[in-house]
Amino acid sequence: MRFVLDASVALSWLLEDTGAGQAFATEVFGELAEPNAEARVPVTWTLEIANVIAKCEARQILQVSRSQAFLAAIEAAPIVVDGETAARALAQTLGLARRYGLSSYEASYLELALRSTLPLATLDRALQAAAKKAGVQLVRST
């Protein structure tokens, strides 16, 4: 399976949230172990992940050992950082942010999903709603 991976899913998996979010995140990361699987992410994805890790470690919500294990897992996963995100930020991405009331970070996932015609894996409700309006398929749990 190929899809666009929102940071909300990865961070739910890292922080071991309870409930449906954690189950979905675990399922999505399981998909990445399948042959020919690939998750595409905008260039901002790595910064979002790093920011949350740094803040959670500083607040002692997350231990460095857990962060390191997570970083090793995502480094080994077939996650491809999109090289065109920045070039589209001030036109297409900004337009999507305006149209759907999203942050530019959220809109970057929508822009990538639209451009690549891939489904979007996200736990973000606003991004889910915008994706539906824009005609982007969402990755669903099985």
Image: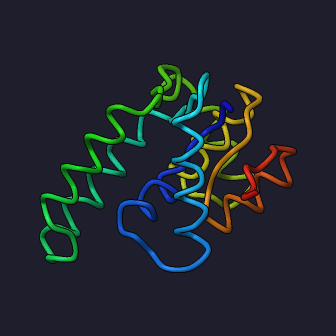
Instruction: Tally the marks.
Output: 0
The quarter of the picture where the N terminus appears is: top right
Determine whether, in the image, residue 65 is placed left or right of residue 127: left
On screen, residue 115 above or below 95: above
User: What residue is rendered at 42% in x and 43% in y?
Assistant: 45
* In the foreground, 32 or 51: 32
Q: Residue at x 49, y 79 (%)?
A: 18
Task: Inspect this view and state whether residue 85 appears.
Answer: yes
In front of the other: 14 or 125: 14
Q: Percent position (x, y) of residue 142?
A: 76, 57
Residue at point 69% right, 36% down? 113
* Above/below status of 88 relative to 98: above
Q: Is residue 89 visible?
A: no
Colour pattern: rainbow
Q: Is residue 17 left or right of residue 53?
A: right
Q: Position of residue 19 (x, y in %)?
A: 56, 79
Where is residue 95? Give x, y as percent.
69, 42
| Residue 39 quadrant | top right
Asked if residue 118 lies left or right of residue 18, the reply is right
Q: Compared with residue 95, is residue 77 higher up or lower down, i.e. above or below?
A: above
- Which residue is rendered at x = 36% and y = 68% of the image? 15
